[in-house]
Image (cartoon, rainbow, N blue to C red):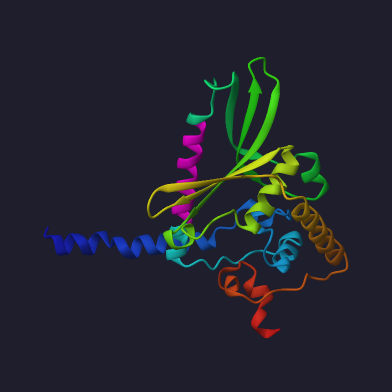
Amino acid sequence: MDLKQLQHLLDTDRRVTRHMDEQNDVVSPRDVDCMFHPSSFGGCARRLSYAFMGATPVHRIPSKLRRTFSHGHALHEMLQGAMGKIYNGELSDTGGYRATFSPEVSITRRELAVEHNIAGSADGVITIETEEGVELARVIYEAKSASESSWSSTGKPQPKHVMQATVYAKCLGADAILFEYYNKDKDVSKYFLVPPDEEAWEEVKRVLAEVVARANKGELMPGEHSYECRTCPYYTDCRPELR
């Protein structure tokens, strides 16, 4: 069999694209759990309404963007794995304390999360303890990947990212948030250590309370009309261009 025939049989590009497109047909339990997920905070509030009211999402993610998401998930796993090796429970050689890293720490059943109907997981939590096991600090770890163009202009964490991570910090009783912004074009990172944002937490609570109050009256939150509408899973319900 010559290469041209073999290439025709493999049909790789079309098969990969079809596989990526088929992911749009998958509706996960997370999609219809009627919970608020921090990854949606700081964006369109109407999306929170649809999620809370249990609307069935219709995913509209192009295959190229789906590959970008897959790349991001793989990078997250790589970065979390590195953190697990760096903060592996051994005593520090500079202070007699020990630091441990726990990946994918859920907030779903934490008291504050239950109170505000929030579900999700932080990328990780770094716990710093004395040699005797007394906890000194708890730090939320959040990994973000970016292209060179956006990474090079990043001098501090994005406000939306701080808002989302603050929710994890509040629910998990953390003292600070460590962001790692990873340049996926050059394989280098920037690190930012910041405190939880109290104003952002109050804004989250205010918005979520309003979403619930409006939903109880059969109403949706006001919607936005932006480039994000193109891939919003509730576009077919919302149709922002008709408002």
Give the answer, above or below, for where 175 lies relative to 210: above
Q: Please tell me which residue is depicted at 46% across the width and 64% down the height of the picture.
A: 65
The quadrant holding residue 230 is bottom right
Q: Residue furthest left?
A: 2
The quadrant holding residue 26 is bottom right
Give the answer, above or below, for where 153 lies relative to 82: below
Q: Nearer the viewer, residue 143 or 186?
A: 186
Residue 199 makes an appearance in the image: yes
**Residue range highlighted in magenta:** 69-84
Horizontal and vertical percent for residue 33?
A: 70, 53
Horizontal and vertical percent for residue 141?
A: 59, 41
Q: For the stretch drawn in magenta, what is the main secondary structure?
A: helix
The reply to whether the magenta stretch includes residue 71 is: yes
Q: Residue furthest bottom?
A: 242
Give the answer, above or below, for where 122 lies relative to 56: above
Q: Is residue 31 left or right of residue 221?
A: left
